[in-house]
């Protein structure tokens, strides 16, 4: 089932957050927050630091502690030993094994058996071309921790056209990120500070941590839309966290996902009965949510599949109405923007 393009609206360019809130003189937990009621469609407006005002003792927040890696790298492209391009951009998309990644090779029409030379110590062979996808499978000359060290040494964060400055990788991390693997920041958790997390714990709000390593959300070509089914992502839910979720729901409390990544991981576990694996689950307005009662998320661009997921929580009409209100109120979009709590 392909992603729908029905949830469309006009987003003014000036509402694209082009720098982190800290660079705008705002603490990360003081971005704006729009609260959207799932039942009534009514909205309220606040700062994210006051999140606890909308949560109850016993509620469970599930956060994604995947850590963002610097997934953009540059390489020399060679075929049969002949240099074809001295500076090809590579965007890592998904780890497939200890020495294999799916990746987007930007603009270079590489073939199987071509080689990419990143440094004197790191190279990769093109070993597979994905069917009907611009992604290629790369076999690296290093593996595991050694390969990850090289990626950190050579890479830089993925950034899109609305980000005007190459911000340091630290700006693309949540404060609780601990498991490297996301090629784009799981950005719904970015607004949390340790102070806010401590405040929520004091109130009796529970916290649980899972991992879903995000893939590339955009392939730099509008003619190549990336549907959720095309975007397989690795996830892991600790058994203790799943037990925590079950206890919370059985006691009548709410499970609130911090981000679309968490929704995808938890609902995949419910649908397939597997706590760790690869998921390409597409969640839309007809999808029956079994694990999650609410979501904390950012604001998503027109026609994004993330909007389809949000329509599993609220009607498309209420979602669009709230988004138009957010535009009129000057909320900021994307990973460095403002937040939306749907409960």
Image: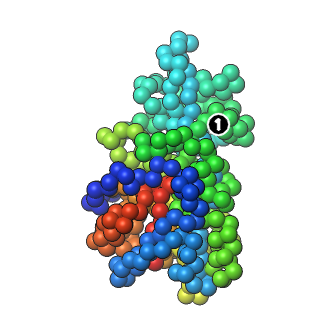
User: Which quadrant holds residue 56?
Assistant: bottom right
- 174 in relation to 105, above or below: below
Q: What's the image's color scheme?
A: rainbow
Which residue is rendered at x = 59% and y = 88% of the image?
A: 251
Q: How many other residues sit within 10 Å of disc 1, few (<14), some (14-19) or many (≥20)? A: some
Point out residue 200 in the picture as x, y percentages from the top left corner. 64, 77
Question: Count the marks: how many?
Answer: 1
Under circle 1, the secondary element is helix
Write down the residue under mark 1.
151
Which residue is rendered at x = 48% and y = 77% of the image?
A: 293
Say whether residue 134 is left or right of residue 101: left
Specify whether residue 255 is in view.
yes
Point out residue 216 in the picture as x, y percentages from the top left corner. 48, 46
- 278 in relation to 297, above or below: above
Residue 3 or residue 62, whichever sits in front: 62
User: Which quadrant holds residue 312?
Assistant: bottom left
Residue 211 or residue 86, whichever sits in front: 86
- The residue sitting at the right extreme is 146
Specify whether residue 263 is in view.
no
User: Which quadrant holds residue 72?
Assistant: top right
- 326 in relation to 113, above or below: below
Which residue is rendered at x = 42% and y = 42% of the image?
A: 161
Say whether residue 296 is left or right of residue 143: left
Point out residue 303 in the picture as x, y percentages from the top left corner. 32, 55
Which residue is rendered at x = 57% and y = 71% of the image?
A: 49
């Amino acid at each position: 089932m392909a992603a729908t393009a029905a949830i469309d609206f006009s987003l003014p360019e000036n509402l694209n957050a082009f720098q982190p809130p800290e660079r705008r003189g705002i603490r990360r937990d003081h971005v704006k927050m729009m609260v959207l009621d799932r039942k009534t469609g009514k909205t309220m407006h606040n700062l994210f630091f006051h999140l606890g005002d909308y949560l109850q003792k016993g509620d469970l927040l599930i956060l994604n502690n995947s850590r963002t890696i610097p997934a953009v790298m540059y390489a020399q492209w060679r075929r049969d030993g002949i240099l074809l391009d001295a500076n090809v951009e590579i965007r890592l998309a998904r780890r497939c094994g200890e020495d294999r990644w799916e990746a987007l090779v930007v603009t270079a029409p590489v073939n199987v058996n071509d080689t990419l030379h990143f440094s004197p110590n790191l190279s990769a062979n093109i070993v597979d071309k994905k069917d009907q996808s611009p992604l290629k499978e790369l076999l690296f000359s290093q593996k595991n921790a050694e390969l990850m060290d090289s990626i950190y040494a050579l890479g830089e964060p993925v950034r899109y056209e609305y980000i005007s400055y190459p911000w340091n990788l630290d700006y693309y991390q949540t404060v609780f990120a601990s498991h490297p693997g996301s090629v784009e920041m799981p950005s719904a958790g970015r607004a949390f500070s340790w102070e806010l997390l401590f405040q929520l714990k004091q109130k009796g709000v529970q916290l649980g941590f899972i991992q879903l390593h995000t893939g590339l959300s955009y392939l730099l070509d509008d003619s190549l839309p990336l549907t959720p089914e095309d975007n397989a992502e690795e996830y892991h839910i600790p058994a203790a966290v799943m037990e925590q979720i079950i206890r919370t729901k059985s006691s009548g409390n709410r499970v609130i996902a911090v981000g679309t990544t968490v929704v995808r991981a938890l609902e995949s576990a419910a649908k397939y009965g597997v706590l760790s694996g690869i998921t390409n689950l597409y969640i839309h307005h007809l999808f029956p949510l079994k694990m999650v009662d609410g979501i904390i998320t950012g604001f998503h661009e027109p026609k994004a599949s993330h909007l389809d997921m949000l329509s599993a929580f609220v009607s498309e009409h209420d979602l669009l109405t709230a988004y138009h209100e957010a535009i009129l109120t000057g909320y900021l979009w994307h990973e460095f923007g403002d937040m939306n709590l749907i409960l």
